Image (cartoon, rainbow, N blue to C red):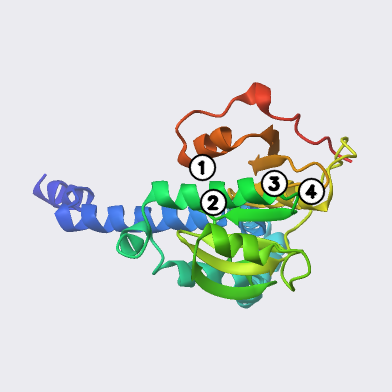
Amino acid sequence: MSELWSQLQFFRPGWLDALQILIVAFLLFRVLLIIQRTRAMQILLGVLVIAVVYLLSQVLRLTLIEYLLETLIQYGAFAALVVFQPELRTALSRLGQSRLLRVMTSMPENQLIDEIVHAVTELARKKTGAIIALEREVGLDEYAQTGSRERVGVSASMLQTIFTPGTPLHDGAVIIVGAEIRAAGAILPLTQFAVTDKSLGTRHRAAIGLSEETDALVIVVSEETAKISVALRGRLERDIDSARLREILGGALPERPSALAPAPSRV
């Protein structure tokens, strides 16, 4: 009886074990936040499927399949380092960019919103096309690398200067991380779905595309109509005013599904 009791003590974690479990769970949670809705998540799901098939082949004694999967896993570890290179680089760069470490360097949220709203309103008034992507939980470093890397504070005057027609960076997107402009002239992915509204230009399609692949909030100013739109989670809210833009940026009000355009249909 005493031997059985001593063996059961293994299943009674102490406070150090509980602390380690919490740390590992937190790290896994942060990794999932970084790769969610990206190609890395799709690859991770594929790896999990392979792992399940491998376990089943061991249980059912499917020796040929087990051997092939063992070979694939053996060399797949090296291939993963190449495939996940952008995500690994992004994850490492974001270790020092957490909200806790940015508290002392970030401007107040209200001031940041004021600068963005003022810039977007002025750009719309002048019929100057623009696209601004705000990073949330999923890193945008992969897309920032396609443009000119910057590290300047967000200001209305800076945003207006970047999108001034004739300047080298006015055709691309601005990527904002926290209270900093991290890239200008960046190239964003176009949506993979067919857009039924032919009035939507390349900027709108790029805004929808980025919001499909990440959780970024993307603001678009149309140079043809001078209207402001916001893309989030693959959906586009069009023709919004400065008050509504401020609400979206500040999260003061929940999203209004009725105001959102229908999700793009598949090709």
Instruction: Please report the residue visible at 74 percent of the width from the left and 54 percent of the height from the top.
Output: 128
Q: Label 4 belongs to which residue?
A: 205
Answer left or right for 126 relative to 177. Answer: right
Say what secondary structure mark 3 lies in.
helix
Q: 6 or 17: nearer the eye? A: 17
The disc label shown at residue 124, or none: 3
Q: Which of marks 4 and 2 is nearer the N terminus?
A: 2
What's under tag 1, amino acid-wise?
A: Leu
Q: Which of marks 1 and 3 is nearer the N terminus?
A: 3
Rendering coords of residue 118 (x, y %): 55, 48
Q: Which residue lies furthest to the top in this view?
A: 258
Residue 197 figure quarter:
top right
* Residue 53 makes an appearance in the image: no
The disc label shown at residue 116, or none: 2
What's under tag 2, amino acid-wise?
A: Ile
Which corner quadrant holds the N terminus? top left
Say what secondary structure mark 1 lies in.
helix
Q: Which of marks 2 and 3 is nearer the N terminus?
A: 2
Q: Mark 2 to mark 3: distance in Å?
A: 12 Å
Rendering coords of residue 179 (x, y %): 45, 60
Above or below residue 92? Residue 10 is above
Q: Mark 3 to mark 4: distance in Å?
A: 18 Å
Above or below residue 135? Residue 117 is above
Q: Label 1 belongs to which residue?
A: 249
Q: Earlier in the sequence, mark 4 or mark 1?
A: 4
